[in-house]
Amino acid sequence: MMIGFAVLSVTTRQLFRAAIYLLFSLVSVAGIYFWMEANFVAAVQIIVYVGGIVVLIIFSILLTQQAGAEMPKPSLSKKLWSFLAAGSGLGILLLQILKLQLGTVNAKGALFDVKAIGRELIDIDTHGWALPFEVVSMLLLASMIGCIVIALKPGAIIKHEMKES
């Protein structure tokens, strides 16, 4: 499902559909994390990427009034570079799978202890990772406000305020 939705996301010419396919692809990635019993990583995947990034992308598309617009057809050179990049990524992935020799690694439960992750994120004595998360949330908020400001037509705020008074 993940690969299918990812391919649909990059091949569709409708911008809104591409964002929805991206949403389904990221939910599928979270499903793979759940399947691997990495529940914390799956929850973060859903909260940050599905709940934050994709919603921000969809709001940006809707606010710029480009939801129904069709993107232009890519040129032949763009298609060739895209296939070259995808083929290179697939080749690197296959090489890594061959190097890993599936079945020899057993790290079940070693990296996914939620209490240890929580302590690492919040403990000020060690690293204090809470501040970077707050900075990222402020960055997302600022980018969303920026999208709204860019999407508004010039003078739309002034006209709206004049109607209220």
Image (tube, rainbow, N blue to C red):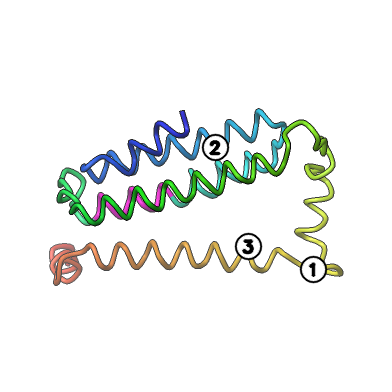
User: What type is the residue that disc 3 sits on?
Assistant: Phe
Q: Does 73 appear in magenta?
A: no
Q: Earlier in the sequence, mark 3 or mark 1?
A: 1
Measured Cα–Cα span from mark 3 to mark 1: 12 Å
- Relative image position of residue 69 (x, y in whole percent): 15, 47
Above or below: residue 120 compared with residue 24:
below
Q: Earlier in the sequence, mark 2 or mark 1?
A: 2
Residue at 43%, 46% in the rendered image:
87
Q: Which residue is mark 2?
A: 29
Q: CB atoms at circles 2 and 3 under 8 Å apart? A: no
Q: Nearer the viewer, residue 54 or 141?
A: 54
Residue 12 as seen in the image, left or right of residue 31: left
Q: Considering the numbered disc 1 on the image, is that residue within a helix, a strand or a loop?
A: loop
Which numbered disc covers residue 127?
Answer: 1
Q: Nearer the viewer, residue 88 or 159?
A: 88
- Relative image position of residue 17 (x, y in whole percent): 28, 38
The quarter holding residue 63 reads bottom left
Above or below: residue 25 compared with residue 70:
above
Measured Cα–Cα span from mark 2 to mark 3: 22 Å
Residue at 52%, 46% in the rendered image:
91
Q: Considering the numbered disc 3 on the image, is that residue within a helix, a strand or a loop?
A: helix
Above or below: residue 161 compared with residue 103:
below
User: What type is the residue that disc 2 sits on?
Assistant: Val
Residue at 73%, 37% in the rendered image:
101
Q: Which residue is mark 3?
A: 133
Q: CB atoms at circles 2 and 1 under 8 Å apart? A: no
- Relative image position of residue 49 (x, y in whole percent): 51, 48
- Relative image position of residue 74 (x, y in whole percent): 19, 51
